[in-house]
Amino acid sequence: MLLVAMAWWLIAPVAEGVFYYTNRLRGEYPPPGNHVEIPVVLFFIGWIVITPALVALVWFCLRQYPGAVSLFAFNTARPVWSAAWTLALLIFLYSDIPFLYASIRDRYPMDLITGLIEVYLMLCLRSSVIHSASFTRKDRKNQAGRAALPREPK
């Protein structure tokens, strides 16, 4: 999941550049003036500002994630926690689906790839948060203690 987060983070500026380059070739911006440069600079400022928050979120989600949890898992031990994170994911998807549709309709393949990676990353983050919440500290210590014990040969 860390590789997915890094790929999304690295692809975002490329997709943004391709978007503006494609629009410029399509003639959507007037030739004189700085109509393209302002949004590009604002994107990079936002990209730099959001990086620490993204790193913190990925660390929070990855610190206890085993990787073998289903993307659509629901933790019955903590249903409110699972429902809250599922609701957050659905709100994100509700806002991202029009972007994905517009990327397909207007033929922006890099935006579509970025959006799909974003959706997969959010599914992974939700799954990891729901899984990590299923254990208490006592359960984690017991699991760590059992793993440290030598096993008897069969």
Image (cartoon, rainbow, N blue to C red):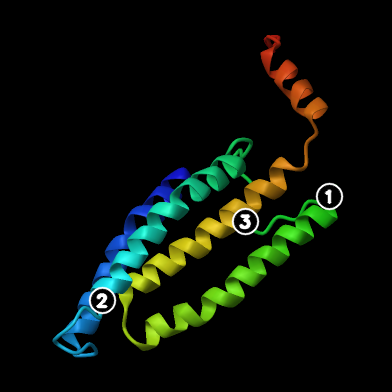
Q: Earlier in the sequence, mark 2 or mark 3?
A: 2
The local crowd at label 1, few if under 14, some if 14 to 19, many if 20 or more residues have their Cα within 10 Å, is: some
Rounded to the nearest angstrom, the CA distance separating label 3 from label 1 is: 17 Å
Which image quadrant: the C terminus? top right
Given residues 72 and 52, the one toward you in this image is 52
Establish if 2 lies above or below 112: above
- The quadrant in which residue 114 appears is bottom left
Q: Can you see residue 21?
A: yes
* Residue 107 horizontal/vertical position (percent): 31, 83
Rounded to the nearest angstrom, the CA distance separating label 1 from label 2 is: 45 Å
Rounded to the nearest angstrom, the CA distance separating label 2 from label 3 is: 33 Å
The kind of residue on which mark 3 rests is Leu
Establish if 34 lies above or below 59: below
Q: Secondary structure at mark 1?
A: loop
The kind of residue on which mark 1 rests is Arg
Establish if 120 lies above or below 90: above
Residue occupied by mark 3: 71
The local crowd at label 3, few if under 14, some if 14 to 19, many if 20 or more residues have their Cα within 10 Å, is: some
Residue found 51% across the figure and 56% down from its top: 121
Given residues 37 and 149, the one toward you in this image is 37
Mark number for residue 20?
Answer: 2
* Left or right of residue 114, residue 59 in this image: right
* Residue 56 horizontal/vertical position (percent): 54, 43
Given residues 116 and 61, the one toward you in this image is 61
* Left or right of residue 83, residue 99 in this image: left
Residue occupied by mark 1: 78
Residue found 78% across the figure and 61% down from its top: 83
Q: Secondary structure at mark 2?
A: helix
The kind of residue on which mark 2 rests is Tyr
> Comparing marks 3 and 1, which lies closer to the viewer?
1
Given residues 110 and 71, the one toward you in this image is 110
